[in-house]
Image: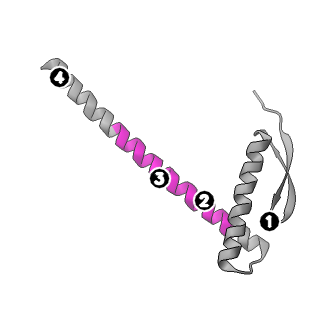
Amino acid sequence: MNDPKRSVTVRIAGEEHSIRSSAEPEYTRRCARYVDERIHTIKQQVGLLEGHKAAILAALSITDELFQVQDALAAARGEAAERAEKLRRRLERALDG
């Protein structure tokens, strides 16, 4: 089922952008605020930067954050699977014993 795309106007780095998305408008605004905040933070840390360079650094920073969370999630899933397997073996031994 295709969700209809909605147009939402957001402000990122001082510029308005019209974004078409099937996501809820508030979610799109939330994403835009996050990107805008990251660009603002990078500009404060680094100083004067051209807009596209700040956007590139923000994209790299957000991607790094995403990859770190994905790695942590994969590790947690691995640990959960390992624990589940240990519990399964313990249950089998208890039921067999």
At label 3, which amino acid type do we have? Asp
Residue at the spot 26% in from the left edge and 34% down from the top edge: 86
Label number found at residue 71: 3
Residue at the spot 23% in from the left edge and 24% down from the top edge: 91
Q: Is residue 77 left or right of residue 62?
A: left
Which color scheme is applied? one colour
Q: Is residue 90 left or right of residue 67?
A: left
In what quadrant of the picture does the C terminus appear? top left
**10 Å crowding of disc 4: few (<14), some (14-19), many (20+):** few
Question: Is label 1 or label 2 in front?
Answer: 1
Q: Are marks 2 and 3 in contact (CB under 8 Å)?
A: no
At label 1, which amino acid type do we have? Ala
State yes or no: residue 61 in magenta: yes
Q: Are marks 1 and 3 in contact (CB under 8 Å)?
A: no
Q: Specify start and end residues of the magenta stretch as a single range.
A: 56-81
**10 Å crowding of disc 3: few (<14), some (14-19), many (20+):** few
User: Helix or strand or loop: what does disc 1 sit on?
Assistant: loop
The residue singled out by tag 4 in the image is 94
The residue singled out by tag 1 in the image is 13
Q: Are marks 4 and 2 in contact (CB under 8 Å)?
A: no
User: Helix or strand or loop: what does disc 3 sit on?
Assistant: helix
- The mark nearer the N terminus, 4 or 1, is 1
Q: Are marks 4 and 3 in contact (CB under 8 Å)?
A: no
Residue at the spot 78% in from the left edge and 32% down from the top edge: 3
The residue singled out by tag 2 in the image is 63
Residue 10 occupies quadrant: bottom right
Location of residue 16 with respect to 25 vertically, above or below: below
Distance from Cα at disc 4 to Cα at disc 3: 35 Å
Distance from Cα at disc 4 to Cα at disc 1: 62 Å
Q: Are marks 4 and 1 in contact (CB under 8 Å)?
A: no
Question: Is label 1 or label 3 in front?
Answer: 1
- The mark nearer the N terminus, 4 or 3, is 3
